[in-house]
Amino acid sequence: MSAQRVLFLGGTGVLSAACAREAVAAGLDLTAVTRGRTTSRPLPEGVRAVEADVRDDASMRAALGDETFDVVVNFIGYTPDDVRADVARYAGRTGQYIFISTGSVYARPAPALPIVESSARRNNGFEYPAQKLRCEEALEQAYRYEDFPVTIVRAAHVYDRTTLPLLAGWTAIERWRAGKAVVVHGDGTSLWNLLHARDFARGLIGLVGNRHAVGDSVHITSDEILTWDEIHLCLAAAAGATPRIVHRSSEDIGREIAWMGPVLQEDFRHSVIYDNSRIKRLVPDFSPKVPFAQGAREIVAWFDQEPSRRRANPELDAAFDRLVGDRHG
């Protein structure tokens, strides 16, 4: 029996790179379309790499012609026009189209916890989840009225060793190592969800070719519940630093650091707990295996391997100084 032919739109991002490695390990016949840019996450051996612009039909047709695939996975679709183009391009050419969406499409604050796939969705006041929600709606219409075989996957906050899951990024680590405090929104007790990309990949590849997932939406998130203070404490411990934390309201942080305001006020300040019953029914072997304490150690070790990776943002550092105040500095 021949291996399933799978097409990834994307392949070098946090999610897609981990999924490419898992796909190769699972014996899938994988083609990945990328822009050919250099990356810290190269495609593994065994993947057919194709360079094209996925948003340009002529570029895609030149690269792939009329090839058919058992499954197409879109990691980079962002606008309704992106996914409508895919519906036209892959209708009749794939048995399943998996769209990677986000848990941020759900209403904030959640009317009830845990959040299930049928929980209320709405525009939460900033562009990224609003666009993903419009993509979901376009694909749901295509499934209902055009029999397009879509599966929507909602990820939460997925990271790998190259990504610090804080808006402050490496600046937070540098501040701790310098004996300075890091600002955390609210009182640090809102609940958040972090999932290692390796765990996400196990769930995603389990859905590839799974006919029971067609026409459905599915969470792939962690069962580990963390407060924002706990997330910071894990990273400080991994960095061998004293975790000095100062709490400020999301509004106060947004006044000092404008780009953080919408994300904190519309998303991060709210507690989120996701129900993973559906993915566990569809993929019985799915069980996240990387606790964030371990993931934090991987992150800090990766950044510490190469000095050029450890870049603090001086403007953000100065803004934190103002938020912390002299009595905490």
Image (tube, rainbow, N blue to C red):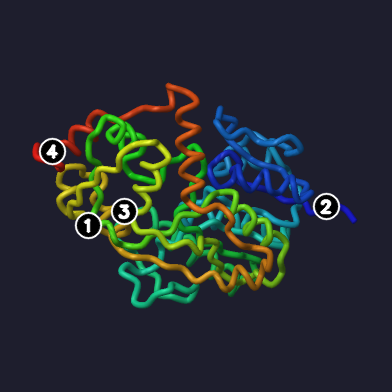
User: In screen coordinates, is 84 left or right of 61?
Assistant: left
Q: Is residue 246 above or below residue 49?
A: below
> Would you identify the image quadrant in which residue 109 lies?
bottom left
Q: CA distance from mark 3 to mark 2?
A: 45 Å
Q: CA distance from mark 4 to mark 1?
A: 17 Å
Eye-nearest disc, 3 or 2: 3
Q: Earlier in the sequence, mark 3 or mark 2?
A: 2
**Disc 4 marks which amino acid?**
Arg
Q: Earlier in the sequence, mark 3 or mark 1?
A: 1
Q: Which residue is mark 3?
A: 229
Q: Secondary structure at mark 3?
A: helix
Q: Is residue 134 visible?
A: no
Image marks 3 and 4: residues in contact by CB distance under 8 Å: no
Q: Which residue is mark 2?
A: 3
**Disc 1 marks which amino acid?**
Gly
Q: Which residue is mark 4?
A: 322
Question: Which residue shows up at 60% across the image and 42% down it?
Answer: 17
Image marks 4 and 1: residues in contact by CB distance under 8 Å: no
Front residue of this view, candidates 76 and 146: 76
- Locate residue 246, reporting x and y percent: 20, 47
